[in-house]
Image (cartoon, helix red, strand yellow):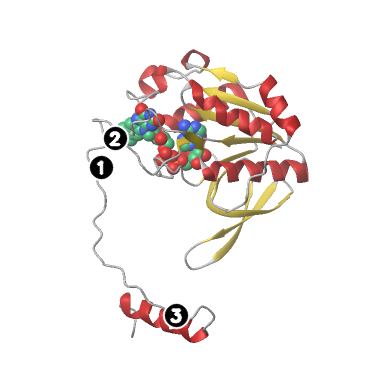
Amino acid sequence: MNIVVFIKQVPDTTDIKWTENNTIDRNGLESILNPKDGVALETALRLKDRYGAKVTAVTMGPFQAEAVLRLALAMGADDAFLLTDRKFSGADTVATARVLAQLIKDKLGDTDLILCGQVAIDGETGQVGPSVAAQLNIPQLTYVDEILMFEDNKLTVKKETEQYIETISAELPVLICVNSELEPRLPKIDGYIKAQQYCCNTVNMEGLTIEQDKVGLKGSPTYVSKVFKPENKHQGETENFSADSAAAAWHLKEKIIDYMGLRK
Ligand code: FAD
């Protein structure tokens, strides 16, 4: 099975500053692997452990984003691709997805499974994964909590919605947006050594068969008109309960029912 995992380097802070164009000012921000992408990687590596697979990590970003690819290689990914070019900068989710999808078409070929995080903690649109699936014309499964089984070229997954727990099967190739809370594995020493010796294939605009007006700011139909903090309309109330009391839990449930206007 050929698995591609999309991973993104994101700023590690809640103290975000904005540029005058209402994009995130990334200067001086420390960067980390997007948390759900660590989970997507762990999911891929568990499939590799169980069924055998080649796992390729891919990121689009500035040159420094190779740090997350080295981490992926140290954890156990077999190969890594860094998509980097000034012409890719200023991309919205559509242009980002176009470039990621084009890498698969031009360089990676037959891909059975694409895994990505459900959302990135900076942009937080959750659009990139589904948009890549649309570009490649393959099915997508979103909000996936667990991959249960791989059999007869089909993956069976569990996803939790607000009302149901669903079990769905899909034939490969498929794109999955991972939303579980799996703990990503820590790299071992030999993984770190491997990642020190080899990092990644670097691909720029020239390496892809894509027109310039389809990437970066030029290829982005979205613009950010305003950024604001939502107003806090309700003042919180503090209730003191004894920790082990079932009555306390019942009382809290009753308060929530009243608060939300759900009492019939
Ligand atoms: P989501 O859709 O929430 O991410 C879901 C998953 O998709 C991730 O978990 C990951 O698996 C995958 N994924 C997302 N992005 C990547 C990636 N880059 N590489 C690999 N996998 C990925 N951002 C900048 O950094 N610089 C800019 O100049 C810039 N300009 C922008 C201009 C506009 C008008 C807009 C609307 C956005 C801009 N952004 C810019 C933000 C950028 O579009 C998003 O960061 C990016 O498209 C991903 O969207 P998201 O963060 O909502 O990811």
Q: Which residue is drawn at 46% across and 16% down?
A: 205
Rendered location of residue 215, percent (x, y): 39, 23
Dot 2 alpha-carbon crowd within 10 angstroms: few under 14, some 14 to 19, many 20 or more: few
SS for tag 2? loop
Instruction: Name the quarter showing ligand 1.
Output: top left
264 sits to left or right of 10: left
Tag 2 and tag 1, C-beta contact below 8 Å: yes
235 sits to left or right of 118: left
Mark 3 vs mark 1: in front? 3
Rendered location of residue 248, percent (x, y): 46, 83
Q: Which amino acid does label 2 sit on?
A: Trp
Q: Residue at x 63, y 45 (%)?
A: 184
| Real-space Cα separation, disc 2 to disc 1, in angstroms | 9 Å
Q: Which mark is residue 241?
A: 3
Q: Is mark 1 within 8 Å of ligand 1?
A: no
Mark 2 vs mark 1: in front? 2
Q: Is mark 2 within 8 Å of ligand 1?
A: no
SS for tag 1? loop
Give 212 or 233, whichever is nearer the viewer.
Answer: 233
Task: Count numbered badges in the picture.
Answer: 3
Q: Which residue is drawn at 39% across and 40% down?
A: 123
Q: What residue type is labelled 3?
A: Phe
Q: In which quarter of the image is residue 26?
A: top left
Rendered location of residue 12, percent (x, y): 45, 39
Residue annotated with mark 1? 227
Image vertical order of residue 225 relative to residue 211, above or below: below
